[in-house]
């Protein structure tokens, strides 16, 4: 018996210690609040189409995401996916507010609350500051498993738009170009499915922005094989104002 106990003790001692550190703690704190956003239709094959990422805010019964993620979703089909892998649960959501200039949308969850992330109310961020974001890269191609990427704010610049034909310009695009709406350019690899996810400042664990877009060199489908390493995020102040107008605490 003593030999058995000694063997167990030595085996446990040889096991690597559990990873610790600010990023490990940040991921553990953020993941329960991050959801995949998509559409669910029983009569469609496939029934589920993942559009992007969102995260719980306010009272936990609301989701913040990018407006372009949910724009055009068939009526009554907009849903969030909570959890990961085969254990993910589906809940209906509806849009209750939007900010077209800053590409943000606020959704209300039907019958579910989640741990809400705190929005950043501190000083202005500067170039070179470290950030991290969690989301569902390339949708559900690899399954519903949220991934975290980190990098720095490489520039604060007018939001970049992919080159489009003049006839494809929307009023929102033209307005954003005219207003020179500023965004964080990130030195970090993301994918189209990350859109709408939270950009977090690791020291405080608060959301400083919403992932808006990733620079895709060729086509959206090629992003998984040839990511650009350039990501844009919208600063969080407009989202704070949207929550306040909806009667929610940021």
Image: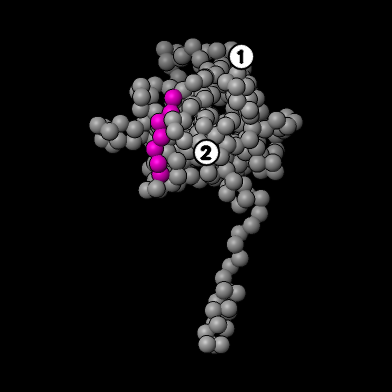
Residue at 58 percent across and 79 percent down: it is 10
Q: Is 104 placed left or right of 20 in the picture?
A: left
Q: Quadrant for the C terminus, please.
A: top right
- Alpha carbon of mark 2 to alpha carbon of mark 1: how far? 35 Å
The residue wearing badge 2 is: 114
Write down the region rendered in magenta. Answer: 88-94
Q: Quadrant of residue 44?
A: top left
Residue at 70 percent across and 39 percent down: it is 129
Residue at the limit of the structure toward the front, as seen here: 111
Residue at 60 percent across and 18 percent down: it is 245
- Residue 179, label in figure: 1
- Element type where label 1 sits in the image: helix
The answer to whether residue 96 is above or below residue 211 is above
- By secondary structure, the bulk of the magenta-drawn segment is best described as strand
Given residues 136 and 84, the one toward you in this image is 84
Q: Is 196 placed left or right of 186 in the picture?
A: left
Q: At which x and y percent is residue 202?
A: 66, 43
């Amino acid at each position: 018996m003593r030999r058995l106990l000694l063997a167990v003790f030595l085996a446990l001692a040889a096991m690597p210690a559990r990873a610790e550190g600010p990023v490990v703690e940040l991921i553990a704190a953020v993941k329960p609040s991050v959801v995949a956003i998509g559409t669910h239709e029983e009569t469609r094959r496939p029934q589920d189409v993942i559009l992007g990422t969102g995260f719980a805010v306010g009272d936990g019964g609301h989701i913040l995401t990018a407006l372009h993620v949910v724009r055009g979703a068939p009526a009554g089909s907009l849903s969030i996916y909570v959890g990961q892998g085969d254990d993910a649960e589906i809940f209906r959501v509806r849009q209750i507010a939007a900010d077209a200039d800053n590409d943000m949308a606020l959704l209300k969850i039907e019958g579910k609350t989640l741990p809400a992330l705190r929005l950043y109310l501190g000083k202005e961020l500067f170039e070179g500051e470290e950030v991290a974001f969690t989301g569902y890269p390339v949708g559900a191609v690899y399954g519903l498993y949220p991934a975290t990427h980190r990098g720095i704010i490489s520039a604060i610049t007018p939001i970049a738009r992919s080159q489009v034909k003049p006839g494809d310009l929307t009023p929102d695009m033209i307005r954003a170009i005219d207003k020179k709406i500023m965004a964080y350019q990130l030195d970090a690899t993301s994918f189209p499915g990350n859109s709408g996810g939270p950009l977090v400042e690791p020291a405080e664990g608060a959301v400083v922005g919403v992932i808006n877009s990733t620079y895709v060199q060729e086509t959206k489908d090629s992003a998984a094989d040839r990511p650009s390493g350039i990501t844009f995020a919208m600063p969080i102040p407009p989202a704070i104002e949207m929550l306040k107008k909806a009667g929610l605490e940021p």
